[in-house]
Structure formats: C-alpha cells, structure tokens
Image (cartoon, rainbow, N blue to C red):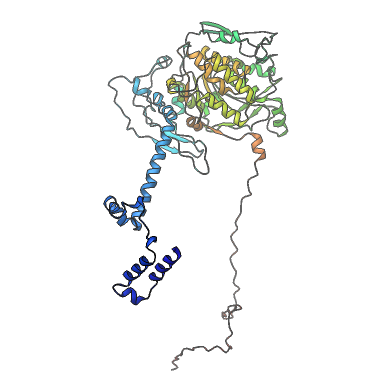
Amino acid sequence: MTGVSLGLLRTGSNGSLNQLQNGGGLLQLQQKAAALSPGLVRRPSKALLYYPREKERVCPFICRHLGRGRVAMLLMVALGLSVFVFGCLTLYKGANIPGEIEESRTYAITRYETLKPEGVEDKSQDRRETSFTSTGRWAVTPPHAPHPPASSESRSRKGYFPNSSHQCDHFAFPPPPPAGRRRPGPRPCPVCYIPVEQAIASMPSSPSESPLLRTLTYVHDESPIKSEPHGGSDFGGYPSLEERDAAFDIKGSMTVRCGFVKGSRPGRQTGFDFDEEDLLELDQYHDVIVASAIFGNYDVIQQPRNISPEAKKNIPFYMFIDEETEIYMKNASILGSSRRVGLWRIFVVRKAAYADSRRNGKVPKLLLHRIFPNVRYSIWIDGKLKLVVDPYQVLERFLWRTNATFAISRHYRRFDVFVEAEANKAAGKYENASIDQQIQFYQYHDGLTHYSKAKLPITSDVPEGCVIIREHIPITNLFTCLWFNEVDRFTSRDQLSFSTVRDKIMAKVDWSINMFMDCERRNFVIQTYHRDVLEHMPPPPPPVVRRRPAPRVVPLTNRPPTKKTPRRGRGDRRSGSRRRHKVGSVVMNIN
C-alpha cells in the first residue's frame, strides 16, 4: 500500500505538461490517490500543529529574510562578536589578582602626588623626549629641573622629600611593548634616568639610618657541630633551629651566623679563600662597587657598556671565578697576569665552600658586605647579564630617588611562592622532595600563605634575584645574612626563601624593599645564554655575498648588426609547411 501510494504520487508529480496546465489536473491526481489508499493519508504531527499560523505570528521577519545572504552574514558577525566579548570578560575575571598587583605600582609611581606640599602645581603635561638607542635600550630624557637641587645635608636624611619636584616625578610609566614573533618573551620598558653628573650629585652624604638594629656582629666558630640531620654546612656553621628563630628577633645589637665562621677573616682559611694580594684589594674603601661571579665555567663574561668616565674612574667592577673557570680563561687567552678582563677585576676563589657551583655563587651574591667590609653601595648582577646603563644612574633611580636601602625586581610572571615552587619542580631546577620539604616547613613553621591583595603594598613574594641593588647598613646586612642561612639550610633556589625572611623582618621593624618591575630591570641589563646553551647552538649561517655580474663587453666591429633568429620549439612549424597563411599586402613606394 505504501509503495502504491508513493508511486501514484510520484506519477502525478511527473505528469505531462498539458495535464498540469489544465485547471483540474493536480486535483484529479489527488482524488485518485485518496480513493485508492484512504488509510495512508499523512496526519500532521502534534509538534507541528502551530506551524501554519503561529510561525507567521512569532517570526514573520525571520522567515521572510533568513534566506537572504546579507542577513545570514549579519547574524554570523553578531554571533562572533558576542563570543569575543564573552571570552574577554572571562579572561578578565581570571586575572584579577595580577591586575591588582600591576595597579599597585601606582603606590610607587605616584609617590610624589601623595607627599607633595600644598601649593605645588601639577605639571603632568610636561613633554619628554623618548628615543630608542643603538644599544636596544629605551632612553628617556627628563626636562630641566625647575628648581636647584636640595643641599647634601637635606638629601642625607632618610624619608626626606624636597619641595622642588624631581625631574622624573611626572614620567608617564608606559607598559612594555607587546611580544612579537621574534621576541615572544618579556620585554624592557622605558625608565627615566637623570644625567650621570646629577646622579652623582644626588648621592647621600651620610649612610641611611638602620631601623632598630645599630650593631651587627658575626659568629666565629672553628669547630662547628652539626646538631640536626638536615641542612647546613661547615661554611655556614650549622645553625640550629633555635638559633634560626632567635635571629629574627631583632634588637639594637645582634650576633648572627653569616657564613665565613672559620678563619681569621673572610677569605682566609674559611673555605672560600682568596690570594693574599686580593685580600688587600678587598679592604679598600669604595662608595660604589659592581660585582658578579662565574662558577663552574657556567657563563661567558660580559663587558659592561655605556659606562661614564666618572664611573670607570671611581667604581671598580669585581668578578669572582673558581679555579675551573680560571683554567678555561687562561687556556683561551682571556685571563692574563694582570687579572683584568676589560673592566672586570678578577678574583679567583680557592677551595670553594660547596660542590655545587650554583650554591657557591650565592656566597658573593648575598654576602658582599662580608667580603667588602668598607663599601657603601653595591650592585650585584649575575654572570649571564650585561650592564648597559651607568651604575650611578641605576643607584639614583632605584635607591636614592625612592629613599630605599634594598631594591630587587619582582618576577615577570609569578608572584606566589607555591606557584614558583611548582615551576622549579617542573623545570628540574632542584630535587622535588627537597623543594616540597622547604615549602612545607615554611607553611607549617613560619605560616607561609599564598599571595593575595591583602599584602599590598607588597607587590610580589617572588623576586627575579639576578640583580640586587643595596646599601650596606646593619638592617640590609642582617637580611642578606638570614637569607643566605636559608639557602644554606634548604635548597639553593633563593626565590623560595626570599619572602619568608622579608616578612619576618618587616614584622619586627619599619623597613621595606623596593621591588620594582621586571621590565625596568631589563632596561639596564641584557640577559644572555649560559655557556652550555651557547656551545650547543648551531653556528650562524655564513653571510651570503651577492656579486653583481660583470657588464657585457660588446666588441667594436664595422659589421652591421645582424638580427638573430629566435629558436623554435617543437610545436613551431616551418615556413615551408602545407599550412595556409594569410599574407598581408605590402605597399612599396618607389620614386
């Protein structure tokens, strides 16, 4: 029955044109089909009962115009726009904490707006010239100071902010340029430096005041005893847990363990020794020094650039290396008898304290005040970095301008210690069990918590510790001593212990650390690859020298130029073929 009815309907639909043109052709076919199969009449679906009229009532415009191409395209554009807006809102909701952290830089940038006296006009519309130098650094030229600089006596007072505004107070802090295909990582951002002469003149004439702590001495122990199964070394003196906790109880006069526990002085029979001629150099007085280190032949020495004549004359550049690196540099004819490589004065460490080269590098990095007891300011840069801004300008920007005594950049991506620990484990920076043990100890013994906006104005718990800018006063010396003790007790990853030591000291005294943005650090140092990476990198391709072809020399002859016959291909026919050609008429006028 079903096949017959379909066949009849199909036959009726394919009838002759004359039948369809007649008025009752289609009606007759429908009547015949109904008579033969009265029970096969299709009933309308219950879901489609509203279709004839309600659809026209609800969406007459859509039914009429949906088939048009323009309307469909507009609907697709609207759908894509709604998806884009929803995605942006989702990303914004997931980045609330980093946004609040970045907004907190207003605390430091608009410091003048908070402290400026009444009656001082806002000159935020002052113009500045920003240029990109040949060294790849952003250089911002500040306008001339409207008032003469304050006296050295007033500058030396900690917390003093002059009535005359600083040249860079209204510098508009721009965001770093976006990452591109060639440079997908973090980028430097513009930093406002003042001229070198003005930076030198802004150096405080007297040391900053150390809050609460006035005198700091160090433990000397020729026979240190290991009282606990985990952590510590002979060089650090194996401080007990009770000694560790007592060191955070800050008083006016303190004695703590700070490496170099053996020997008559740091660098002599201490397990981190120097030659006698070098010990005389370490005792010299300097206002400012720049220090770095390469252990285990791990890096390639980098020469500073853009250093002023005043800095070359007054600021020594010290590089610490171990005996392995010394042998390599001598075999490569890099190091000679003068012990100088460019601007760097080389110090060779004899009998290094640790078997781990990276842990040996923490000794000069954190204990510079013990190696150089007569230095006021120091700038530490890791061996893989190249300094490209004058040290006086760096000190003025990050210490003297902000009345800070310790400055370090925060990590460009991570600001939570727990996240930093997982990143170290994923990258294989240290043993996972040792990292977990350290984090658990901080969590249950010291009360370490995840970073949140409740810590503001502290902007991060994770530093980018490759650069340290500091003034050598008792409170900063205590901070680096206790920080080194954590590195000596636990893992050598100093990023994990930084916030614990900082927070425990800040809970006792009114002292803070200037944690500037990482893009600012990238403005005055350039990061290079480690030696092992450089050695495994493929050599650069040789330059392609393109020589211009020699000009064609045409011999001078008296023969008339002959017309060359073009070469024929396989498909070309000769003129003598049987193919008929239409030859045009040629008219020649012969007179």
The residue at 63%/31% (across/down) is 301
Horizontal and vertical percent position of residue 504: 51, 14
Seen in the image, is 302 located left or right of residue 108?
Answer: right
Q: Where is 429 relative to 4, above or below? A: above
Taking depth in this image into account, of 151 and 97 the one nearest to the observer is 97
In the displayed orientation, state which residue is furthest to the bottom: 591
Work out whether residue 337 or residue 226 is closer to the camera in this orientation and state it.
Answer: 226
Q: Quadrant of the N terminus?
A: bottom left
Image quarter where the C terminus lies is bottom left
Seen from the viewer's position, the closer of residues 234 and 92 is: 92
The residue at 45%/65% (across/down) is 3
- Does residue 126 sit above or below 361 in this rendering? below
Residue 414: tell me if it is visible. yes
Residue 305: quarter of image: top right
User: Quarter of the image holding residue 323?
Assistant: top right
User: Percent x, y for residue 562?
Assistant: 57, 80
- Is residue 368 visible in the rendered image? The answer is no
Query: Residue placed at 48% from the left, 34% from the top?
Result: 188
Q: How many marks?
A: 0
Q: Where is residue 208? Give x, y as percent.
A: 47, 14
Residue 255 location in percent, x, y? 58, 7
